[in-house]
Image: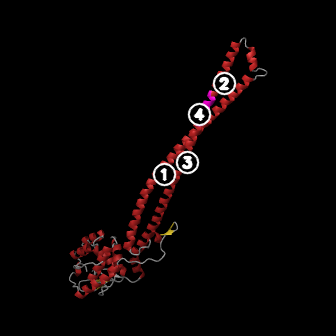
Amino acid sequence: MDMDARSLTKRSLKTALAVAVLAAAGAVCLAAPMPAGSAVVADGRGATSLLGRAPDSLAALQKEARRTRAQMERLNAEMQVVTQKWEAARQRLDEVNATLVQARRQLARSRTELDRQRALVAGRMRTMYKTGDFTWLDIVTSASSLADAETVLDFLRKISLQDRHEETDLQRLTGLARRDEHAVEADRQQAVQAQAEVENQRFAVDQKIAERAALLKDVVARIKKILSAPELLMKAGGKITQVTWAQAFLKSLGVPLTADNVAAIVAWEMAEGGHWYNTAYYNPLNTTQSMPGATVFNSVGVKAYTSWLQGLKASVITIRNGYYGGILDALRRGNDAQAVADAVAASPWGTGSFTPKH
């Protein structure tokens, strides 16, 4: 009860019963079965197959969501590394392609120059060996002396040697250009293979991220369904338990819906005894908050409300009236049920001490 109902005594029988019921409630705290086959399919595999077994409770779903987000963070970091490798591989391939273009141009120039030299030699040979009826014999016989003929023949030999030297050098350069082309082509094949391997890595990581994203979407959807279930149950007029009311109360307050918080609120409900152990209907915490149509349960003003939604709203109004900051602070932390119970006992609500059980 709140501060206006401090004088309401708690029966020892109710306390004993509360402990017994709380022990049972702790075993099912936060349990919310989900329909079979609700897993989201991701690339041919459902969320259930990724999990091994889909979690059913809110705590398990929240743990799975944290685990999946951590996996996605690691995968995103891995994707950044792989993307950097892909960029490096792409840059390397661009460089090799540019080098290959230059090598092929050089080979083409060498071949052109070799063909030109061969054509020049062939033309020269045709001119030297036969121009009409002019032959080597004509050159020798037309010389004024043997010395003149030897001079002409020596000159021709030098030209021939020079031609052969130039052709040999051009053949060497062409061979080098062809060798460079083959070497760069081999580099290009390696660069293409490296880029393909990194591209496959990118695809694999991207698929993993997509799978985890689908899994996280499914888990978040089921978390939202669990969080909204108690309120929907109230609106639909379904059966409300201490656990579902605790969940709805925490959701309405906007505090973490953790196992510790639910255990603390369920224990608080039992310590107060509203609705389930008295006729303060729809008022598990025995608040005295006035609401339209509410009736007075006892001499200190504890109310019986007209519906679960009205009773829930009254409890929320009461705890937010400025006197219960310690309780709200403990609930916002969400990690210590006993801290919530101690804050309730130290507040003006008047509940007294109690011990939550998980």
Badge 3 amino acid: Gln
The residue that mark 4 highlights is 173
Distance between mark 4 and mark 1 Cα atoms: 36 Å
The residue that mark 3 highlights is 189
Q: Position of residue 316 (x, y in %)?
A: 31, 75
The residue that mark 1 highlights is 86
* Vertical position of residue 278 compared to residue 178: above or below: below
Identify the mark nearer the N-term, 4 or 1. Answer: 1
Left or right: residue 43 versus residue 27 is right
- Based on the picture, tell me whether residue 174 belongs to the magenta stretch: yes
- Label 2 secondary element: helix
Query: Which image quadrant: the N terminus?
Result: bottom left
Identify the mark nearer the N-term, 4 or 3. Answer: 4
Distance between mark 4 and mark 3 Cα atoms: 24 Å
Q: Nearer the viewer, residue 199 or 28?
A: 199
Q: Nearer the viewer, residue 193 or 244?
A: 193
**Mainly helix, strand or loop, the magenta region?**
helix
Is there a contact, CB below 8 Å, between mark 2 and mark 4?
Answer: no
Residue 183 position by quadrant: top right
Residue 141 position by quadrant: top right
- Colour approach in the figure: secondary structure
Identify the mark nearer the N-term, 3 or 1. Answer: 1
Q: On residue 339, which mark appears?
A: none
Badge 4 amino acid: Leu
Range of magenta residues = 165-175
Q: Position of residue 34 (x, y in %)?
A: 44, 77
Identify the mark nearer the N-term, 2 or 1. Answer: 1
Left or right: residue 82 versus residue 338 is right
- Label 4 secondary element: helix
Residue lying at 42% horizontally and 81% vertically, measured from the top left: 236
Residue lying at 51% horizontally and 51% vertically, measured from the top left: 194
